[in-house]
Amino acid sequence: MSKLHTVEDPTDWLNTSLSSFEPLEAALRCQVCKEFYDTPMITTCSHTFCSLCIRRCFNSDGKCPTCRASDQADKLRRNWVVQELVDTFKAARPAALKLAQAKAGTEDEETERAKRKRKLDQTDIEEDDIGETRRPRRTRRSRSAVDGISQEEPIEVDDSGDEDYDPEEGTTLCPICKSRMKVGLVYAHLDQCDGKPVNNNGAGRSRVQPSKPKEPPPSAARLPQFNYSLLKDNALKKKLQDLGIAAHGSRALLIRRHTEWVNLWNSNCDSTRPKTKRELLRELDTWERSQGAGASTVPSAVMRKDFDGQGWAASNKDQFEELIANARRNRTRKEAKVEKTGEKPSEAQTDSTPTQQPEPAPSIEALVRQDEISKPYEGNEEALSIVREKVEETNTHGRRLRSSGQPIPERPRDDEVPMRTDEGTSLDGGVEANPPISSQHQSPQFVPISPNVDMSRKAHMFRLPEDPIVDTDGGRSVS
Amino acid sequence: MANPASKRLFKEYRGLSSDPPEGITAGPVTEDDMFLWEALIQGPEGTPFEGGIFPAELKFPKDYPLAPPTMRFTCEMWHPNVYQNGTVCISILHPPGDDPNHYEHASERWSPIQSVEKILISVMSMLAEPNDESPANVDAARMWRERRKEYERIVRENVRKGLGL
């Protein structure tokens, strides 16, 4: 919010003693960019805009933004009066605003009047500092312009200029061309001073003359707009290179870049204070980043550091949940498939030892590994018999539990089960773990699709590894 | 802030925050991104929308103000000129170049001299006086024309819902 009030705005005048200045200032601002007119140009339909603004608008739809009359950029003419109004108003603004704000709080009209007089005297110096130095004649003329608009508040902000107005206060001479200018502007001026006197501080009207021959960069002639449809890609690229601007990107981008450059260049030609080509190139670069090639590579909001991840998660909860459910469903289906294929060779199924392995369905590689691990138990009859016992118990137990659900066909071949892995030795835990597994077994996630899958479903419950092991290994060892 | 679009949006934000029109509040969601705004519009008095506060979001294009923003109500809105998803369909939000409905006068359409303030004021008056020539929500438009009582009842219900009553 603090940033907000560093920007000058017509609404600054509201709640001051000069609230009628709000529409005045609004009238001195371009309707397109909302800034004070910069190089105001008048259209054939008599509407005024900044040179750059109206050129961009014409490029966009060829119509006046105010009345929508068709018009062309080359029919624009400078509007010097508006330029002068804006310049003088800008110069007078800070002091006037200060005065108006200071007065706003007090009530007593009489003391107010006296104060105002004093304040005026105090602000004179400041005002001259801020304002551009002008000859007295110009000051008087522009003052009357401001006066006429603000009749109900006859406060003359630069009234005392007549008494002690010093046009040279706060100014200095350029050591090269001996032009008089504000102290702060000398260094910028020195960069481009060519020794000839600058005429923007000259007598009233001379400033108005286009200063093109003296100030702007060498080739200050206005650029023509191309008929892009007649230009091949390479020719267009060549043109851009000749102009000294970037020539990369798609054809559409080249056209947009050239259009923007022509706008920047031509509006600079209109200006009484032209910028150097380097400054214009910098402006083109700004454009490039915000609307040209750079604009598309701006990372999405999600990538930003301060992105509100939780908020995003909350607002998209439904979608995320749907995606998760989908993923689960797919995985289950895949697992079922894997198990099914794994079972086929064995033809029979066993309710092997219950174990609860947290990892997902094993891959073929995992099966092979399990196979190797199980070998050490081959000769251990004692362990195997214990395992068989437990398996038997589990089977009956498990069936009982499942009785409410789908009946599981009995599979007698539990003698093959002993080919269990190391978990076989810790059967107690396995048996205990069985009931929850059975109940999980009935959860909708494992809804059987076919009898075949029903079997695989069982296999899933006791982890797949055993089945192929039983089959391949057992078969091998038996033979 | 360097590009003209965010500069101009910042200006508008500045103007709207120091001198807001009655019944309208609007501003960017964060000051770092001038291209997404939130707005609150009060239901105009003397209409079934009276008493309601209607939140909406405005999205601005990079070449604003040459092109208009889009506006979408983020609450439930039963209105002939508001699509089911909340998108507002009024002439000021349409660039003069394309006229999908062939009924709008060019003078009513978007132009760079329009502003967020003018859009929101137009939307407010749209709430009071729907334009059923080219409805975005055909059902709502028919109901508004033929069964005004029912239309008003639904609108009032939405107002109450929006207020959490």
Image (cartoon, grey):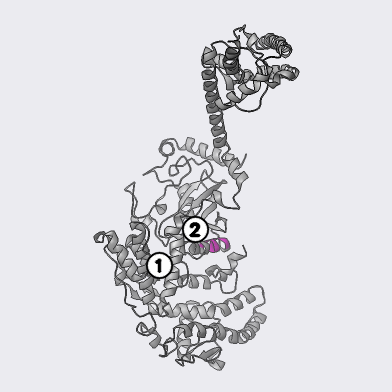
Percent across and percent down for residue A225 are 29, 67
Range drawn in magenta? B12-17
Residue designated by label 1:
A53
Identify the residue at image location x=62%, y=65%.
A2
Left or right placement of residue A268 versus residue A34 in this view: left
C-alpha span from label 1 to label 2: 20 Å
Q: Residue B117 carries which label?
A: 2
Left or right placement of residue A216 versus residue A414 in this view: left
Please tell me whether residue B124 is drawn above or below residue A280 in the rendered image.
above
Q: Residues within 10 Å of mark 2 (few under 14, many from 20)?
A: some
Mark 1 touches mark 2? (CB < 8 Å):
no
Q: Which amino acid does label 1 sit on?
A: Cys
Percent across and percent down for residue A387 are 71, 13
Assess whether residue A207 is covered by the magenta stretch: no
Identify which residue, A267 or A131, lies in the foreground: A267
Identify the residue at image location x=30%, y=63%.
A236
Instruction: Return the chain for callout 1.
Output: A
Assess whether residue B15 is covered by the magenta stretch: yes
Q: Is residue A30 visible?
A: no
In the picture, the quarter occupied by the C terminus of chain B is: top right
Instruction: Return the chain for callout 2.
Output: B
Q: Which amino acid does label 2 sit on?
A: Glu
Q: Nearer the viewer, mark 1 or mark 2?
A: 1
Dominant SS of magenta comes to helix
Q: How many marks?
A: 2
Q: Quick one: SS at disc 1?
A: helix
